[in-house]
């Protein structure tokens, strides 16, 4: 079963401000699903996105 996060949950998870999440949505840096006017994010997809954003050291 998918674990869905709202903007507040995602901001806490990433240790960011909610406004940063909204900015990334507007800039299409982050994908989400809008249900009933509320953004939701699949935690597995967020984790995959985080791994894709990692920069290799060296």
Image: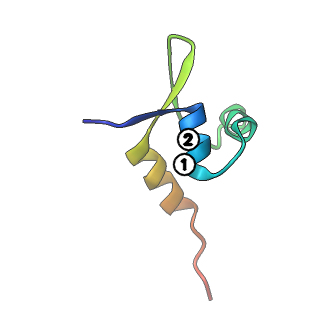
Q: Residue at x 65, y 37 (%)?
A: 28
- Residue 55 versus residue 14 in the image, above or below: below
Q: Residue furthest top?
A: 36
Residue 27: x and y in percent read 72, 37
**Residue at 50 percent of width and 52 percent of height:** 49
What secondary structure is found at the residue carrying circle 2?
helix
State the quadrant of the C terminus: bottom right
44 sits left or right of 50 in the view: left
Q: What colouring method underlies this structural image?
A: rainbow
Up-down relation of residue 55 to residue 25 (above or below):
below
| Crowd rating for badge 2 (residues with CA inside 10 Å; few <14, some 14–19, many 20+) | many
Residue 44 percent coordinates (x, y): 38, 47
| Quarter of the image where one finds residue 19 | top right
| Residue under label 1 | 13
Q: Which residue: 57% across, 13% down?
A: 37
Cβ atoms at labels 2 and 1 below 8 Å apart: yes
46 over 2 or under it: above or below? below
Residue at horizontal 67%, vertical 38%? 21
Report crowding for label 1: few under 14, some 14 to 19, many 20 or more residues within 10 A (C-alpha). few
How many numbered discs? Answer: 2
Q: Is residue 49 left or right of residue 20?
A: left
Q: Which residue carries the number 2 mark?
A: 10
Question: Gap in Å between the C-alphas at discs 2 and 1?
Answer: 5 Å
């Amino acid at each position: 079963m998918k674990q869905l996060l709202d903007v507040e949950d995602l901001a806490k998870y990433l240790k960011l401000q909610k406004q940063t999440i909204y900015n990334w949505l507007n800039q299409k840096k982050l994908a989400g699903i809008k249900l009933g006017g509320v953004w939701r994010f699949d935690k597995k997809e967020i984790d995959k996105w985080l791994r894709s954003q990692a920069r290799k050291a060296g």
